[in-house]
Image (spheres, rainbow, N blue to C red):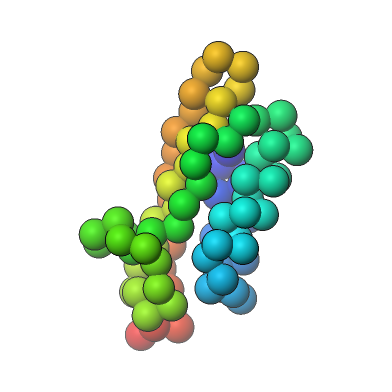
């Protein structure tokens, strides 16, 4: 789960197509044996939908591995918005 968060963080430096990044991350999780619950890129300040103009994002994720539900998040600075 954390590896997918890190991968998405890197991809955010070249693309702000949030829905495409979220879909790709869910596919990565599925291929790794997880059952994704959600994977979402949001504005870190208010958790509204992310925009390219936001200065900080947070990537939120939850997925099941068997009966265990894993939850994680990662804050990302948008250096191009400054």
Frontmost residue, 27 versus 9: 27
Image coordinates of residue 61 in percent, x first then y, are 48, 42
Relative vertical location of residue 78 with respect to residue 45 in this rendering, above or below: below
Q: Residue 52 is drawn in which quadrant?
A: bottom left
In the rendered structure, the answer to whether residue 26 lies left or right of residue 46 reads right
Residue drawn at 45 percent across, 83 percent down: 80
Q: Nearer the viewer, residue 38 or 43?
A: 38
- The residue positioned 25% from the left and 61% from the top of the image is 45
Q: Is residue 6 visible?
A: no
Q: Position of residue 69 (x, y in %)?
A: 49, 23
**Snapshot quadrant of residue 15:** bottom right
Residue farthest toward the top in the current orientation of the protein: 67
Quadrant position of residue 82: bottom left
Tell me which residue sits at (51%, 35%) in the image: 37
The number of numbered badges drawn on the structure is: 0
Seen from this angle, which residue lies furthest left? 46
| Residue 47: % across, % down | 30, 56
Q: Is residue 35 above or below residue 39?
A: above
């Amino acid at each position: 789960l954390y590896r997918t968060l890190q991968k998405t963080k890197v991809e955010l430096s070249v693309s702000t197509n949030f829905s495409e990044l979220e879909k790709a991350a869910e596919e990565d999780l599925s291929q790794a044996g997880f059952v994704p619950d959600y994977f979402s890129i949001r504005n870190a300040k208010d958790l509204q939908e992310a925009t390219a103009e936001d200065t900080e994002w947070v990537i939120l994720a939850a997925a099941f591995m068997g009966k265990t539900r894993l939850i994680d998040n990662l804050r990302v600075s948008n250096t191009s918005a400054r």
